Image: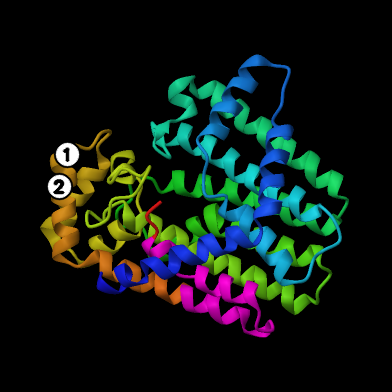
Amino acid sequence: MGTVIQLKKQINNSYFQLKDSVEDKLVLVEEKIKSKLESDVSLVSKMTDYHLETGGKRLRALLTLGSAKLCGYNKGARDINLAACVELIHSATLMHDDVIDNGSVRRGKKTLNKVWDNHSSVLVGDYLLSRCFEMMVEDGSIEVLKLLSSTSSKIAQGEVLQLQHKGEVDMLEETYLRIISSKTAELFAAATKVGAILSNVKTKEKEALEFYGRNLGLTFQIADDTLDYNSELKLFGKRIGKDFYEGKITLPIILLFQKGNVQEKENLKKIFSKTNRSESDFNYTLSLIKQYEIIRESYNKAHHYINLASNSLSIFKDCKEKTILEGLTSFSLSRDF
């Protein structure tokens, strides 16, 4: 854990450096998102306004803007439009996620489905996706349209795969990686590759940024899943145990099940087969996680993807944008917001 704490300042700086480097465009992305979500239907307006007020890191939009800048894009506003599009895809998946998981809090505020209802949340999520496809068509690039529509399809399949394996504490690590690759890493990969597509760079640069984004996304999700069991860190807007109480099987539980003895495995199976898990169930699971040093092992696995992501940028010339993106590869491991 010491290494993680030491990295904190450097990593958070990388995020803010990226944000600062594209600040003028990020403001326009926010304006684009707001204008695209306008609706004559009052409930749609109320729900999208509420969603916008919850904020967010806008990391995927930042990755599109940063990748485009790294590749020398300076021809117009396509990066702004597509950064907004990528962010809206992400927002739509969050709305659907909260319905599936019966989520109640996101970014420190009540979720849309708790303020209104599941039906409205699903439909507003669909509204966001329809706006995304309008923006893809407006952009006019078949390559971008194919990439982002394919990405949306893969995200949906990842959701179904996760649902299919809900409650399986003996889930294979390979299956978990397939789920997070589809649900999270695909959109990271698309966000970074879009930046390269806009710049008309060579195929190898596009592939390098796609590989970078995918491995950054895997790192991000592994870290996020690990934070749910890390009582050493307190994060804004993320309540410890959220995944546990929702019955999600993530890397810490998979690794714990692998290490546990026969009785502990049986106990874990019983806990995750329940409709609702208690605080004592959570405390028992946390005690095992500490006993087997699962947090450390999970972070070690995330480091593998950090290295892959960072190394993929080696084909680009040294510059400010490259340095920032390299620094971002460790961002997830110690973010405190």
Question: Does residue 152 appear anywhere in the picture?
Answer: yes
Task: Name the foreground residue: 287 vs 270.
Answer: 287
Magenta highlight range: 306-334
Q: Which image quadrant is residue 73 in? A: bottom right
The three-letter code of the residue at mark 2 reads: Asn
Q: Position of residue 76 (x, y in %)?
A: 85, 56
Which is the main secondary structure of the residues drawn in magenta?
helix
Residue 283 is labelled as: 2
**Labels 2 and 1 touching (C-beta < 8 A):** yes
Front residue of 110 and 14: 14
The reply to whether residue 186 is visible in this rendering is no
Residue 52 is a magenta residue: no
Residue 332: say if magenta. yes
Disc 1 crowd rating (10 Å Cα; few below 14, some 14-19, many 20+) is few
Residue 251 in percent (x, y) is at 35, 60
Residue 244 location, quadrant: top left
Residue at the limit of the structure toward the top, as seen here: 42
Q: Residue at x 19, y 60 (%)?
A: 289
Residue 315 pos. (x, y %)? 67, 84
Q: Amino acid at mark 1?
A: Glu
Give above or below for 98 relative to 151: above
Q: Residues within 10 Å of mark 2 (few under 14, many from 20)?
A: few
Q: Residue at x 37, y 55 (%)?
A: 336
Residue at image mark 1: 279
